[in-house]
Image (cartoon, helix red, strand yellow):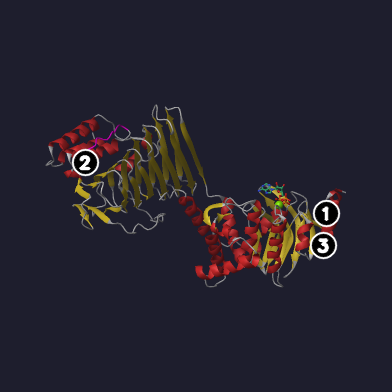
Amino acid sequence: MAGLINNWLEQAEQQNSAEPAWLQNKRQQAFSQLESLQDPNRKLEFWRYADVGRLTQVIDAGTESRPESALPSGNEEHDLVVRITDSGFELSAQCPDWLVIKNINELDEELWADLSFDQETVVNLANVVLFDTGVCIEISKTAKPVSILIDYQFAESNKWQYLRNQIQLAEGVHAKITERLHSGRLNVVNLFQVANQTELLRMQDFILSSTEQLVSFNQFDLNSEASVTNMSQHLGGALQHHLHRVNFNGQQAKYTSGSINKSYNNNNIVDLIEVNHHHKNNQSEVTHRSIAKDKSQIFNNAKAMVAPGADQSEIEQDLKNILLSEDAKIFSKPELEVYADEVVAAHGSTIGALDEQSLFYLQSRGIAIEQAREIMIESFEQEAIVC
Amino acid sequence: MLKINDVYAKAGDKEILKGLSLEVKPGEVHAIMGPNGAGKSTLGNLLAGMPHVEATQGSVDFLGKDLLDLEPEERAAEGVFLAFQYPVEIPGVNNMYFLRTALNAQRKYRGEEPMDSAQFLRMVKQKIKDMNMRDDLLKRPVNVGFSGGEKKRNEVFQMGVLEPKLAILDETDSGLDIDALKIVSDGVNQLRSPDRSFIIITHYQRLLDHIEPDFVHVLADGKIVKSGTKKLALELEEQGYGWLNQ
Ligand SMILES: Nc1ncnc2c1ncn2[C@@H]1O[C@H](COP(=O)(O)OP(=O)(O)OP(=O)(O)O)[C@@H](O)[C@H]1O
Ligand SMILES: [Mg+2]
């Protein structure tokens, strides 16, 4: 039987396995789980508002007009650039002794973390079976504040690349980690393990053409008093599908997320953020700003789960969306699943066009309608820039 | 300068202006008064080009051009300025940035060189001084969180920076305290010149104590029903609009 899962399984069987037995074992478990699941389909909550078929298709480019980046140019100084290519990775400079970067295939067994995947995340599960590149970054306690850019540059943009990155941040570390892809087809899993009192600023900057696809799964495990700020910019793409899963494993930690999603042509973008308040006294703030043009489609959601006893959790979900054409579609869903008694939560979602009165106000001062629209869009995006 | 000739206009689906005519010559100040819902704002909005306000009949000539044929931004660049009765808040857009963008868009339309930020800053600082305005408002997003009076003052400040040929002030005096009323009228008076005209929509003749009008008109039920001098404003203040129905 053809189908995505079968393709993945076949591909996995062809992979050579000079890997340590424990990793082969992990792969085998994922392989068996894949065999028991169904191909991703429209009945799944995570795939309801995206064309699953685009995982296999190569899409016609048509006329390209890439959206403008909303973030300050990605070329600002980074202390270190990790360039991931078809043949592994390169570093722009030598690592100081408090920083270790290894190929993901050389990961120590005790550092491996099992991620929990199921039918909804079947495409991410495929990554466990197939990843053959990526890095493991360990930043130790004695580190200076550091900014690292992970830059993907693959020669063959038509081939799906399966990557896994694991980032370990020791207690008290201050790090900025930017992940950037400006062209390609990627299935990536990122795991961030954030120790006590650690501060992470993470940026995900993905700009794709209308022919390219990208699937990402991002897990953040936060210990006590950790602070993670995640800024995502997802522009374009035949398909972009992102899931951010945040686990509060201690107390008094904070997760702040800002997402800008912009689609045009026939793009599909899915941006899901799931925050699990497993324990008391943690705070999460999720802001989405999405703009869909032409015949494109965006699905964004923010889901917070508050476990029994996780009192004094604070949750904010702020989802705003703009449709720039009649044929564009946006689905936007803030969700709260609360099993604790004392929780402070605020959530809201709006979908609309650019405000006509504001546009006229700008025009009445001499600003042409196109520029007035740009100004309004820019100001709308600003609200999600959290870094 | 401006010649409105027998204009009928709809706002949304409703016919509001019903055969309105008005001529404004260079340097003149015309005050327009009239009961609530008479169509005063609709007239200002029609001249500025607001969406959903549409002329169904008649013509508007502005400095030799068919005003109704121009886009709102073109009208602005030609020299039309509307100080809104209800200025909108635009979060995330800085006032200074907005004003410079507007000014340079107008200059570009007129084939003039853009103003760089240093030049602009100098000019704005001077205007702030001349017009007795507060500069902290300029650092904030356009009208966001401004009090009613602050919004009106911001409108007048924009007018000062953009230096229009025809300024329409829609109830700019409403909601102003006595000092602000003075600041706003001083701002207008400073701009008065032989080639600049004003249409001032107001409910209160006290504004006209500060800004001396050449003409006062009463707009009722979509047309101008009475015109006169400043004396008319005083009479209206005393008598109200009851006489309209007699
Ligand atoms: N877009 C619209 N659709 C339908 N009716 C409208 C629209 N805009 C204005 N109107 C109506 O047109 C009439 C005139 O409104 P306008 O704002 O011009 O009055 P005005 O003379 O400025 O009154 P005020 O003194 O209260 O400011 C009002 O009855 C108003 O409700
Ligand atoms: Mg009015």
Does the Cβ of the disc 1 residue fall within 8 Å of ligand 1?
A: no
Q: Position of residue B112 (x, y in %)?
A: 55, 72
Disc 2 from disc 1: Cα separation: 83 Å
Q: Is residue A129 above or below residue B62?
A: above
Kindly check if marks 2 and 1 are in contact, taking CB atoms under 8 A apart as contact: no
Q: Quadrant of residue B102?
A: bottom right
Kindly check if marks 2 and 3 are in contact, taking CB atoms under 8 A apart as contact: no
Q: Give the side of residue B81 with respect to residue A316, left or right.
A: right
Disc 2 from disc 3: Cα separation: 85 Å
Q: Earlier in the sequence, mark 3 or mark 1?
A: 3
Q: Position of residue A70 (x, y in %)?
A: 42, 54
- Do marks 2 and 3 share a chain? no
Residue type at numbered disc 2: Leu
Q: Chain of mark 3?
A: B
- Using the rendered image of the protein, determine whether residue B129 is visible from the camera's viewpoint: yes
Residue behind mark 3: B230
Q: Give the side of residue A16 with respect to residue A184, left or right.
A: left
x 22%, y 43%: residue? A131
Q: Chain of mark 2?
A: A
Q: Residue furthest left?
A: A18
Residue type at numbered disc 1: Glu
- Do marks 3 and 1 share a chain? yes
Q: In the rendered structure, find residue B237 and report the number of the disc placed on it.
A: 1
Q: Secondary structure at mark 3?
A: helix
